[in-house]
Image (cartoon, rainbow, N blue to C red):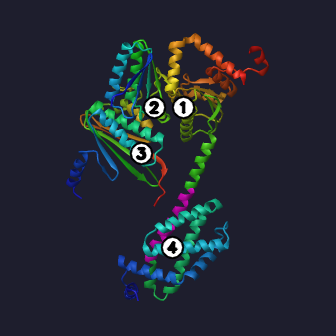
Amino acid sequence: MEVPILKQGSYLIATFQAALTDEDLLKLQDALVMQVGKYRSRGVIIDVTALDVMDSFAARTLRSLAYMVRLRGADTVIVGIQPEVAFAMVQLGLTLESVRIALDLEEGLAIMDQRTKTGKGLALVDQRAKRGVLREK
Amino acid sequence: MPKGNKELHDLGTLTTEKSSTVEDNIALLRELVSHLRQNRTQLRQEWARRITEAKLLTAMSQEEIFTEATAVYDNYVEALETGTFEALQAYARNLSERIIPRGVETHEVIGIVLLLRDVLARSLFAKYQHDFALLFRILDAYEPAANRIANTVSVGFVQERERTIRQQQEAIRELSTPVLQVRERLLILPIIGVIDPQRSRQLTEQLLRGIRTNRAKVVVIDITGVAAMDSNVANALVQTVEATRLLGATVIVTGLSPEIAQTLVTIGVDLAKMNTVGDLQGGIEEAERLLGYKVVPISETAQLA
Amino acid sequence: MRNEPQESLISKLAKAPISVNGEIRIPISSDADIVIARQQGRAMAEQLGFSASDMTIIATAISEVARNIINFARRGEMIMSPFQRSPRRGILVVARDQGPGIPDIHLAMQDGYSTGKGLGMGLPGCRRLMDEFEIQSDVGKGTTVVMKKWSPEYDTGP
């Protein structure tokens, strides 16, 4: 089963299916690393909401994928790891330390926007705006 | 006259024959069952009297004891007759369910079953004392069945009791680890008491589910109320922090006591990845900072606005 | 009882993933079989009353040991079956191959030890995931991994 890759503005979004074989994962890795250059993408979001199991092979592939994407000049965010999958992963010893992670697609897109569009300076403005909201109460 | 009874009388004359076949047993049990049916009223009254005399089932009234005694008696006879224990087992479980909340103890249940066994054995003795050979054979057939019945009822009670205890433990555990939302996207998890592997696991699962449902970004885990921490608990805490990160949230641990801090250093648990703040208040402030909030007194808001 | 009929039954069972007395056998010879094995394992775990977390844990452990077969022996089989030790029950997972075997099991069971195809978390990780874990390996003959997970649900039925 091949993983569909969606181009959304300057991001690529790959959505995992429940059952992915090792071969599917490696194909996805190649396709993403290729397309990042082709579309001059600034970020890659990998949505694993539907993934049933994250074993050591999947974790290793995602880690090297994120690294390769970074070498091609883009950021990677993994979104949608389910609570049960996360629980099994830490017991197995998989923590995806070097990879950026967000709760879901919405959050992943927000992180990407913050990093690629607004940058650090504007993130501070964002904080001040939120502070204002709290004061009003 | 049923075939069984005729066989029984034939067998009764073979006093020297010691080994009994399966068929003999069936015939003997049939004889036994009809005896217990005929004397139903008198035997269960005797049983209820002995229960009261032995001060068992004190939590129940005389009428209740007699009603339950009747039901157990009938199921008992049926189990003897059919050799199947399902009905008795189901009744024993049902009975246990009713009497456990009233504080009936295991020794009482075992006590009443043994009393019934005794009451019935005495009545058999009274009936067959004229023919010892037959009495022995009747008892040989009765004993294993009666033992199995006693076993079934007692085990049923104990299992039901264990089930109740497990349910209560489960309920206590869930009560003891609330995941609370303090502010939008901020959860706190105050841990109090002793943490064992099972509880730490449940705690982690609850927290992870809470993060997803509340879309939390920051979690403050307060362990002020944790008495002691060994390497297992510490490692479980590290795993909780790691799992939380896999859901895209950050953990702040607060309330590490001097004793626990010392233990962690001594056993060499790597807490470098952990974001720790002295107390719960500081932890919540840090969490708000991470979320981009700042709490300001109302008097200052006028100037700042 | 003689041995021959039993052996022929085993070889018959080994041919396809079929279920006898709730036992499932899955031949492992490609990475697609890893996915089949973990899906079957998850389904069995669900039937046995395991929680969602435990189902994922079991599927993850199955994925790891099945991958070990592919990586080191190229082919083998997975056997999954329910077991009962009153009043509790659980799932038994056996992974078996006739591959080259592991020369140093002690080393292979250490965290971070890897021959380059994974993160070195496979076997020690499985031991953490499951309640019981045993491995036996003979160089030149093959490897057998036996794992058990106890169900939290007590079987109080008759």
Q: Mark 3 highlights which residue?
A: C45
Could you tell me how far apart the alpha carbons at marks 2 and 1 are, in whole angstroms? Answer: 20 Å
Residue A94 on the magenta segment = no
* Label 2 residue SS: loop
* Label 1 residue SS: helix
Q: Nearer the viewer, residue A25 or B184?
A: B184
Q: Mark 4 highlights which residue?
A: B76
* Label 4 residue SS: helix
In the picture, the disc for residue B240 is: 1
- The answer to whether marks 1 and 4 sit on the same chain is yes
- In this rendering, position of residue B145 left or right of residue A120: left
Query: Against A40, is A20 above or below?
Result: below
- Residue at image position (60%, 43%) is B174
Q: Mark 2 highlights which residue?
A: A49
Closer mark to the observer between disc 2 and disc 4: 2
Q: Amino acid at mark 1?
A: Thr
Tag 1 and tag 4, C-beta contact below 8 Å: no
| N-term mark: 1 or 4 | 4
Work out whether residue C147 can be spotted: no
* Label 3 residue SS: helix
**Which chain is home to disc 1?**
B
Instruction: Estimate the x, y position of residue B255 in percent, counting from the top left.
Output: 66, 29
From which residue to which does the magenta span run? B140-161
Instruction: Estimate the x, y position of residue C37 in percent, counting from the top left.
Output: 34, 40
Instruction: Estimate the x, y position of residue A12 in percent, counting from the top left.
Output: 42, 20
